[in-house]
Amino acid sequence: MCGIGGLVYTRGTQPCGQDVLDRMAAALQHRGPDGAHFARFPHADLIHTRLSIIDIAGGDQPLSAGSGTLIANGEIYNDPEIRAQIGPEHFRTGSDCESPLRLWERHGADFPRHLRGMYAIALYDSAQDELLLSRDPFGIKPLYFTEFDGGVAFASEPVVLLAANLTPHTACSSARDELLQLQFTTGRETIFKGISRVLPGETLRIVQGRILDRQRLSPLPSQPNTQPPLTEETALAQLDEALMNSVQAHERADVPFGLFLSGGIDSASLLTTMSRLPRPEKLRTWTAVFDAPNAANEAEAAAALARGAQAEHQTVRITANKVWQHLPAIVACMDDPAADYAIIPTWFLAQEATKDVRVILSGEGGDELFAGYGRYRSAVRPWWQGGRRMWRHGMFDSLDILRNRPTRWRDGIMAAEMAAPHVPTRLSAAQAVDIAEWLPNDLLLKLDRCLMAHGLEGRTPLLDPVVADLAWRLPDTLRVRGDKGKWLLRRWLEQHCPAARPFAPKQGFTVPIGAWIAADGARLGQLVAQQECIQEITKPERVRALFQAAAGRKTGPAAWTLLFYALWHRTHIRGLAPAGDVFETLNQSS
């Protein structure tokens, strides 16, 4: 796992100085603490910071072949197969990121079609003055760009582009409204004016500093399924094969790795699969537990599963005091903001795991591919049976907190809904919306930033083409049955790890953020309400009341979102570093 960045210039533009590249490299350092390297050309500059995972001694980047130079952030899981197909004699290193370069020599801009993995790749052809920017189809690895008068700059994170001073530290009001209402932002444009995302599966072709072409790969099978409907027995056998195939590929590493274990279906499925594979040392697992009255607690169940798999297990206890102490730093790592309070346990788990491993496997994607969310079951029911449109209400609807009611906050979700009609069923359409927006712009973003803040690589075996191809061919009856989503995954787990009790009611993994905020509601509410960015968009007296009532089902998430935004704005718009705990930081920024 690494950080990448660079610039390509229009003809006649003076390349930037080394000081700009140094600032960008410094902003990328947390993604690649094992070293920084540069490649400078007359019309382009490339930066790579490395976190060594495979071919530790010989895998430094940039990698070059002929007129092509590549920098990449990610893992190519079919690297062994690509090497065998092309011929090992054509490879100079053991790095899996050499495979895209060799594929480019044969296929040009179509090289991503031959990759299985998670990646953000920049490949510069100095002979043609052409840059390709490519991102994996699920959007597991991030990639951003900005167009300026002298060309195009790109990086793994927006904060790197801000460090280059090529775009202002200005928040777009429409994206801000979307963040407040959805807790994440959708589509190509980020919350920063002038900074855009390379979309999941997209390859940009940039010639002489100007974007000329875009191609895009779907994470899901694009051809209609003409095979006979799968029986449950056949589907279970194919799922077993797919999970074993994917997990084995995702375990390829030259460094220790472990698993985040929540006690839920997805991570339990990964643990069960991993326990069936040979390994030279014990598997390591981590689970978070929240120190709060009535907090959901799956820690005991997770620990029991870990013992059954003979894993070395650690429980990370998260208290309100620890959260308030570290929250400014946690929010600061979310430069592309996602106000998902799951960033809290993810950050603390990463803080502990980095002491022992360099790679973490995690269960993101299981709900989206196998239809686990209750909102999917609601979306497929007709309205007279209680059916509801997904993402129909915003966080602040009916709370009388915002000065102006946002009206366009659902535009990105509507665009994803309009792009989904080609899928075979209403259930598939609901899943496709989340795979297009919620998954890359919330869940995967959270995992990437919280792990990279601690120099950890995150891998998601459920978001793999082999698994996705099977999941997308399942009939609805093998996705949802009655009030149970992820039916097939539950049935598989029931067969291979009955101790996981996959059909038993689950407590879930909900952070008790509302209770924590309410306990300090008067103080937090006053500090948040006096922030200029909050006064601009809210009624301050209502904010103070909201924080004191934060233990409620609706008021808690809303109070958390305003707290997140106040801290985020301070760091990424005003450019102020965290100044102690959450109370000290907010007090110094008012």
Image: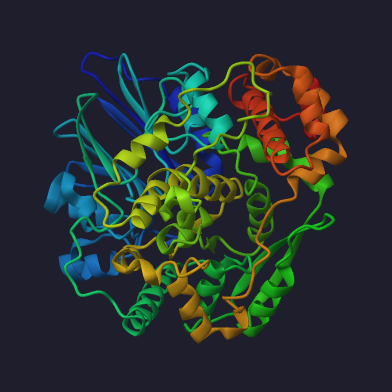
Q: Quadrant of the C terminus?
A: top right
Q: As rendered, which of 350 and 569 lies closer to the eye?
A: 569
Give the image location of residue 385, x and y in percent: 48, 54
Q: Is residue 108 left or right of residue 528?
A: left
Residue under the point 63% across and 17% down: 537
Position of residue 501 measured from the top left corner of the image (x, y, whole percent): 61, 79
Is residue 336 shown above or below 162?
below
Quarter of the rendering containing residue 578:
top right
Residue at image x 59%, y 67%?
A: 264
Q: How many numbered callouts?
A: 0
Q: Is residue 49 visible?
A: no
Q: Nearer the viewer, residue 346 or 262?
A: 262
The colour mode here is rainbow
Query: Residue 295's quadrant in the figure?
Result: bottom right
- Residue nearest the viewer, comparing 247 with 41: 247
Q: What residue is rendered at 51% in x and 72% in y?
A: 270
Task: Answer with left or right where residue 392 lies relative to residue 217.
Answer: right
450 lies above or below 245: above
In the image: residue 382, left or right of residue 128: right
458 horizontally vs 289: left or right: left
Q: Position of residue 498 (x, y in %)?
A: 57, 85
* Point 49% across, 86% down: residue: 495
Residue 564 in the image: x percent, y percent? 66, 33
